[in-house]
Amino acid sequence: MNAFRYAQARDAASAMAALAADPRARYIAGGTNVVDLMKEGVERPSLLVDITQLPLRGIDRTATGVRVGALALMSDVADHPAIARDYPVVAQALLASASPQLRNMATIGGNLMQRTRCAYFRDVSQHCNKRAPGTGCAAISGVNRRHAVVGGSEQCICTHASDLAVALLSVDAIVHVRGRAGERTVPLERFHVLPGSTPQRETVLEHGDLITAVELPASAAARNSYYLKVRDRASYEFALVSVAAALNVAGGRIRAARVALGGVAPTPWRAHAAEAALLGRPATGGTFAAAAEAATRGMKGYGQNDFKIVLVRRAVNRALQHVGAIA
Ligand code: SF4
């Protein structure tokens, strides 16, 4: 590990000033991702600014839903009664993530900022455009069983690792950010960016921007939501494919639908074609099967990960049957 400095921030302004003064400085909260990456030599910050003392841990009801502070722990959010009741998909995704020990350390904001688990990215002896732009992508012709089937580019086909972000996408979450120009909000769907020709850029955040909260709007669909995670083993494993589904069904018809996917793209992936195939239709097995087929539209495998396309179809169908109350 390289030498680095450490500072504990007293408030948001001093944390942001520390980053503004040093382009190689980074925030640290739970440290469950950045410390690993530093040990592996993937990240080499000159300064870690510890933000854990900032007052950003609250989980509060608001007039429009729930506001979760960026430093709220994954375990506290998963256990919160308002989350379990009004956003079951979020609680389920959190409980399917990592291990209890990690959930007791990791924060909501950090979870959204976590970096890919692509093995080539984490091995500094390998070619990786995300870690070292211009060096190539070892995964495209290499071991790509866990890689993306949609949203990738010739530069990078990694997958995003977060379960939480997929669940948040299905409930239209909004990220609150404090930056040099003040406070702003970013819909989660626009928070992460696809690799294109700049795979090193993963979110819309600028250096020094601080996530302060994630807002979860209340909705009937969010209350009737479900997270299905398919993985190689039952615990402490990343998704091969995951589905966050939220449906509002009234009078036998689908009034609102959200379908988000994990493990298939470099960002949490919203399946708009599947949602369009659901909206206004009767909540039947035939509708769900058609939506599941639509969810795979545009997907392309790289050999070892071709199976994911079939898995997406089956997992979306199963998740929709769950929220559509078809046994
Ligand atoms: Fe790097 Fe992306 Fe290629 Fe993985 S898929 S080696 S992260 S460029």
Image (tube, helix red, strand yellow):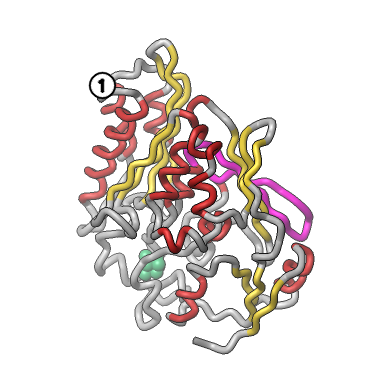
Q: Is residue 91 visible?
A: yes
Q: Nearer the viewer, residue 57 or 48?
A: 57
Q: Is residue 175 visible?
A: no
In the figure, residue 60 lies in which quadrant?
top right
- Residue 242 is left or right of residue 219, and the answer is left
Circle 1 sits on which residue?
Answer: 286
Does residue 65 lie above or below 176 as drawn?
Answer: above
Q: Nearer the viewer, residue 146 or 85?
A: 85
Question: Which quadrant would the C terminus be assigned to in this image?
Answer: top left
Residue at point 47%, 58% (across, down)? 103
In the figure, residue 15 lies in which quadrant?
bottom right
Ligand 1 within 8 angstroms of badge 1 C-beta: no
Q: Position of residue 150 (x, y in %)?
A: 36, 50
The magenta stretch is 169-188
Residue at point 55%, 36% (across, down)? 82
Q: Position of residue 26 (x, y in %)?
A: 62, 72
Query: Is label 1 in a helix, a strand or a loop?
Result: helix
Q: Position of residue 33 (x, y in %)?
A: 48, 68
Residue type of the residue flagged with mark 1:
Gly
